Amino acid sequence: MLKVLSILFGASFTVTTALALGYLLLHRLRLTLSREEAAPLAFVSGSAVLSLATFFVCLAHQARWFVFLSLGVLAIVWAWKEARSSPPRKSLPALPKVWNALFWLVIGAFFLLYFFNALAPETSPDGSGYHLGNVARLWQRHGFVWDYRSMYSYLSQGMEMLFLVAFSFGRHSAAALVHFAFQFTLPWLIAAYGRRFGFPLVGLFAAAIVYVSPVVGKAGVSAYNDLAVAAAIFAVFYLLELSVESRDANLLVVIGLLAGFAYAIKYTAALALPFAAVVVWWRSGAGARRLRSVTIVMAAAAVMIVPWLARNWIWLGNPLAPFFNQWFPNPFYHPGMEQIYLNELNHYPYISHFWQVPWQLAVRGVSTAGMIGPIFLLAPLALIALYQPVGRRLLLAAIIFAVPAWFNTGSRFLIPVLPFLALSLAFVFAKVRAALPLLLVCEAVACWPHVLSRYSDPASWRLRSIPVAAALRLQPEPQYLKDHLPDYAIKPALETLVPPGAKVFSLNTRAEAYLNRTLVVAYESTLGNLAQDVLAAALDPRSQARVRRKLRFLPITTRAVRVVQTASAENFWSMSEMRFYSRGRELPRAAPWRLSASPNGWEVQLAFDNSYATRWSSWQAMEPGMFVAVDFGGPQTLDEVDLEGPSTPESKEQVDVLSDSGRWVPITDSAEYQAMHPPPGLRRAATHELKAHGVGYLLVNETDFFAEDMRKYPTFWSVTELSATRGIRLYLIQ
Amino acid sequence: MINGNEAGNPARGRLSGGSTRNLICLVALAAASCGRAPGRFPVPEQRSLDLGVDPGVLAPFIKMQDPAANDYIVRDIGRDPGIYRWAFLHPEMRFRIGDSAEVHFSMDFALPEQTFRTTGPVTVSYAIDRQALGSIRCDHAGKYQVLKPVPAGWLRPNQEVRVSFDADHRWISPEDGAQLSFLLFSAGFVP
């Protein structure tokens, strides 16, 4: 029970601190808000302030529970004192009693469902993976961990900053409960919006159908950030609507702050800022006032955005990491890997026709990783709302915030759209007598987990039960985690047999929030890419040096040679080894040699290490102008350049030599192709390379491409199996 | 090109002309200077290409605990994994050596107490491609090691070579008649 209390304290303390900071902000800005709308807006804007404050705490490496406690108590006491000396806020017009009762009945039932799921041990894929994995690392190191390289740690972590405060008191479930608070705040804001602008029933209906949406339920009880994004975006929209009534410039400060907070939570929510800026520009009339208004919004947003941009720029050389790596080349994430990752997200599995997408999104939920609820099959009817101005504004917002869903097919990415779509639909149904309550009841029943299981796909991502025993820790947490997270079974072996600081390679992402060791995941970093590549080179002929391209020319004496790519293709350009010859004898590689390449110059040494387990790769699509160059440090006579690597028929190379005048002169572009066999012992070479790059252990699933071979031939791989449980093996590299 | 100044709005002109250009230049400069330059690197440490053999390729020597040990067994040696295997009636193994100069035949085996009590002293002889190389008399239970030079010309480089063993006394199972010679730990050729 102590565990439950610590979880509840961690979450409620974080939420209360955010509320306090939000009330202080709204009070200082003297914004006139009613009681019902002030609370959710205070929570969202206060969360922005708390998130920013936590960022600086992490920067100062002071992320400790007593620091958060001191700052939080200070904010709460300060806000309480200000509240006592302030006049009470006005209330919005009362709601019809029957509607109020129906609304609270639906919201109350789902609130309990969500509460117990959020309180239960956190087992969601991304929550137990990188969201809380990042938080656990921040917590252990009391701040940002600069020597840990994973694309997920490069993302903006506005929500993780809030999780960290809760985590410091109540660990994983406390963080999930903070997201649960945003899940509740979203319908609250929608309902308040309806009441504020004179369509309370529309607001209540929309709030309820958003709240009962299965994907809102599942994402909201997990340590994710989608509901926080949706709440921040809707709050921006809400305040923009308020700004029509009130010309208060301070309102623009909060709009900017929240638009910036949306970016800080999730990159895809960056759209909130141009959206807000354009709306403010549009509505601010002409001249200097327009410029001033937009500047206020941008400046306030910058307060939330710049810290994350600056962190990444200084840390990684890429302010937008882990994306746009081709614009901002860096040694920490390959542009090609970024493209592969994005292509993977932009793909619907099990879908043969595009028209299947709405059905999957609303009802089945397997291709779209969850569903938004059957009522949204009626979404086309929302277009009828175009007849009124508010409907047009809502639908415009829906279209704009649906853009990220084009790039990521997960239904979660439509959550920010749901409030706008639900309100638009509500406007349409409100014209039909009794349609709203009827539809609301039907949707609520249809979205209850036990009913949902009758028509949704069994594999869909959704809530399935109310885990009261697990939530109250009547069922021991480790047992629950073992039952729901296969990775948890390896935890004892991993933390006993692998020393702290040692690197463990895994082809797959892991529940790193629970595994207290440094994991190097294949697709998450350049080191992960390299590790996967060398393991593939041991077994996969497509990754092995099977072709020798011999570029011969008349003997020439030069100081430097470069091999330039002259072809374009989608494949990467790669080479296991580049060798130089004179009269049939290889030039021994010497200390004065200096190697360079473009792109991916950081890994050029892989083409000169005499290892057929490694290879240099452009890690982006082949294009003319790419090169690998060697400066010999003095004149060298040579007549042949050999490129040994996998078969890439698209590749066409040209040899250039550096003339005395300092110009590159092309010598030849005709290559003779020769089949070659890589030397034996590549398995051992692969693990030696991993070890040389600091990876001492392997965590292998039985479905991994090298799992069966490694299990069969550990001595050939030079590994020792340390543990095997639930299809996961832990190996030590000898 | 018509800018704000020409349109008669100085304030707007300053913004859309000079300031905007300056801003664009600044952003372009910042963008051009961002990212990291990889620079030039020295030649790295050269890796050895002598990393042993691949599975399915016979080596000159094998320990019975090796997962590939079964590949070396021709007949009458147990195939269950473990640090040792039982040698039965006519045990035979196969190997491949690269360089045949100054090679020794090596073998680690043991006679367990239980079988020795029945068989008494045992002489284990060994042969290469049916040519007797030597023998060892085991007059007590326990571990034994053989290290015997192989005469020049007996082995051909990169060719498969067969090694057979023979124990003059074997333990015979009263239940199924199985004949157990000795426990083999490792065998093969070493420099």
Image (spheres, coloured by chain):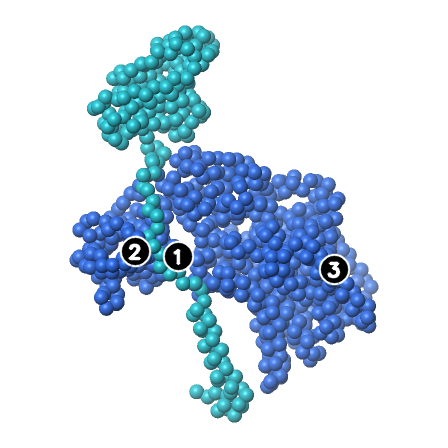
Chain colours: A blue, B cyan
Circle 2 residues within 10 Å: few <14, some 14–19, many ≥20 = some
Task: Report the side of B44 relative to A515 (left or right).
Answer: left
Q: Are marks 1 and 3 on the same chain?
A: yes
Which residue is tagged 2?
A593
Three-letter amino acid code of the residue under disc 2: Trp
Q: What is the x, y in percent for residue A615?
A: 36, 50
Indicate which disc, 1 or 3, sits on the residue closer to the N terminus.
3
Q: Chain of mark 3?
A: A
Q: CA distance from mark 1 to mark 2?
A: 16 Å
Q: Give the residue at x 32% y 30%.
A: B58
Three-letter amino acid code of the residue under disc 3: Val
Task: Report the side of A189 relative to B167 (left or right).
Answer: right
Task: Report the side of A88 relative to A717 (left or right).
Answer: right
In the figure, B114 relative to A352: above or below?
A: above
Q: CA distance from mark 2 to mark 3?
A: 61 Å
**Residue nearest the viewer, comparing A85 with A540:** A85
Circle 1 residues within 10 Å: few <14, some 14–19, many ≥20 = many
Q: Give the residue at x 36% y 61%.
A: A598
**Residue nearest the viewer, comparing A2 with A364:** A2
Indicate which disc, 1 or 2, sits on the residue closer to the N terminus.
2
Circle 3 residues within 10 Å: few <14, some 14–19, many ≥20 = some
Can you tell which of label 1 and label 2 is closer to the viewer? 2
Label 1 secondary element: helix
Instruction: Point out the image quarter for the N terminus of chain B.
Output: bottom left
Q: Is disc 2 in contact with disc 3, using a CB cutoff of under 8 Å? A: no
Q: Chain of mark 2?
A: A
Q: What is the x, y in percent for residue A294?
A: 60, 78
Q: Give the residue at x 30% y 55%.
A: A593
Indicate which disc, 2 or 3, sits on the residue closer to the N terminus.
3
Task: Report the side of A141 relative to A105 (left or right).
Answer: left
Which residue is tagged 1?
A602
Which residue is tagged 3?
A73
